[in-house]
Image (spheres, rainbow, N blue to C red):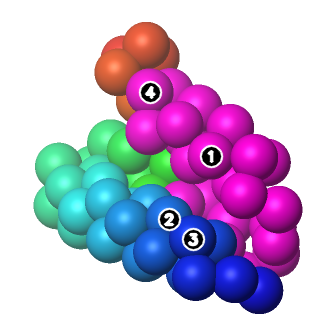
């Protein structure tokens, strides 16, 4: 694992914590699930390109799907 993967993982996990806390407090499913995905994604995805694609899609998904 290189430095860029670690930095992107930290960025996405930090945003995931924010989505997780927001979804839990507001009782909204999509930000909650997206937050869990953003927290767990850097643990399982080691390629920078795949991490960027997955992280960006999980960041935008709650904005597109309102519940």
Do residues under tags 4 and 1 come within 8 Å of each other at their CB atoms?
no
User: Which marked residue is nearer to the observer: mark 2 or mark 3?
Assistant: 3
Decide which of 47, 12 is in the foreground and name it: 47
The mark found on residue 26 in the picture is: none
* Magenta-span inclusion, residue 4: no
Residue 15 percent location from the top left of the image: 32, 60
What is the C-alpha distance between the residues marked 1 and 2?
7 Å
* Cβ atoms under marks 1 and 2 closer than 8 Å: yes
Magenta stretch containing residue 60, yes or no? yes
Viewer can see residue 20: no
Quarter of the image for residue 58 reads top right
Residue 52 circle label: 1
Residue 55 in picture, x, y percent from top left: 57, 47
Does label 4 or label 1 sit earlier along the sequence?
1
Q: Do the residues bearing badges 2 and 3 touch, measured as CB atoms within 8 Å?
A: yes
Q: On residue 8, which mark appears?
A: 2
């Amino acid at each position: 694992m290189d430095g860029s993967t670690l930095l992107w993982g930290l960025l996405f996990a930090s945003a995931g914590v924010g989505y997780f806390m927001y979804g839990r407090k507001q009782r909204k499913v999509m930000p909650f699930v997206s937050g869990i995905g953003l927290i767990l994604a850097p643990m399982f995805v080691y390629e920078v390109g795949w991490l960027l694609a997955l992280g960006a899609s999980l960041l935008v998904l709650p904005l597109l799907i309102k519940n």
